[in-house]
Image (tube, rainbow, N blue to C red):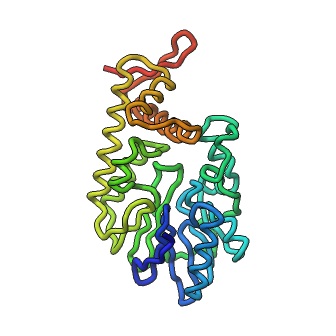
Amino acid sequence: MYELIQAGEQSYYVQCPAKIGIYKKTETEVYLIDSGSDKDAGRRVRKILDQQGWHLKGILNTHSHADHIGGNHYLQQQYGCKIFAEGIEAAFTRHPILEPAFLYGGCPLKGLRHKFLMAAESETVSFSDPEFPREVEVIPLPGHSFDMVGFRLPDGTVFLADSLSSEATLEKYGISFLYDVEAHLNTLEKVSALEARMFVPSHAEASEEIRPLAELNRKKVLETGAYIRELCGEPKTFEEILQKVFQDYGMQMTYQQYALIGSTVRSYLAWLEARGGAEAVIEENRMLWKKTV
């Protein structure tokens, strides 16, 4: 774990739970792509940089989930570097309380206020900032998160963030976290059409060919959508649907899983409603979801 692997002439990644990319701009200056899950990840990355004789110029954040920005605060303190983020992702990075609040749908309970959902806050600047490396292409990849992006480096390596999951992850976990199902499907279509010398997803193996994995992810999303639609064959409340999801997939509910899976199920229900596959009705002061004909 935390092994440095070269992906291209100017690109590397640190093998860890959420891969940390490295763009080697010059012999001594590098940019990170994400920063790991916490302060300890930041320390490990700094050790790698020191061993290579590299100085950190900045951090390019793909999105604001804690396992991708958890090292920001520590590294920014150590190097005084800029952290580049855009849109809603930038707001969540500056104000981490927004993540558990968004997932919970209100002021988050204590059980959601921990480093796995709420990274230490860090200051950000836009991708339009003069110090952003202009030779790096920003690739919009929304769906998993609001304004998630990937990055194409000059050597042809493309970092894909959380736009897709590995086959093992898809088999192990019933439902992967998504914010916007339709946007995610569009992103998978875009990823399938990308050309690159090397693809580096955050939670799957680096590969020269990404289309088969993108297609596998697309099929999984459609299967999950069809499954949730069938749960609405008889009108159910959201809580009843969520309970059935946990039962059917053999999952044990915790506060964190309630928030993550619950948010994802709501997103699928909204997607089904937009497509005409399900509808929400109010009966006896309850919102019920039911499958449409």
**To which quarter of the image does residue 199 belong?**
bottom left
What residue is drawn where x is 53% and y is 53%?
147
Quadrant where the C terminus lies?
top left
Q: Is residue 160 above or below residue 92?
A: below
Q: Is residue 152 left or right of residue 256?
A: left
User: Left or right of 103: which side holds 293?
Assistant: left
Residue 133: percent from the left, percent from the top? 56, 76
Who is closer to the viewer here, 136 or 230?
230
Compared with 266, 289 (above or below) is: above
Direction from residue 82 to residue 263 in the image, left or right: left
Left or right, 241 with reference to 47: left
In the displayed structure, would residue 45 be above or below residue 227? below
The answer to which image quadrant residue 130 occupies is bottom right
Residue 232 position within the rendered picture, expressed as x and y whole percent measured from the top left: 38, 23
Q: How many marks?
A: 0
Residue pictured at 32% horizontal, 44% vertical: 220
> Along the line of sight, which residue is nearer the eye, 70 or 268?
70
Q: Residue furthest top?
A: 284
Point 42% across, 27% down: residue: 244
Residue 16 image point, x, y percent: 49, 66
Residue 104, picture quadrant: top right
Q: Residue 47 location, x and y as percent?
A: 60, 79
Position above or below: 181 against 16: above
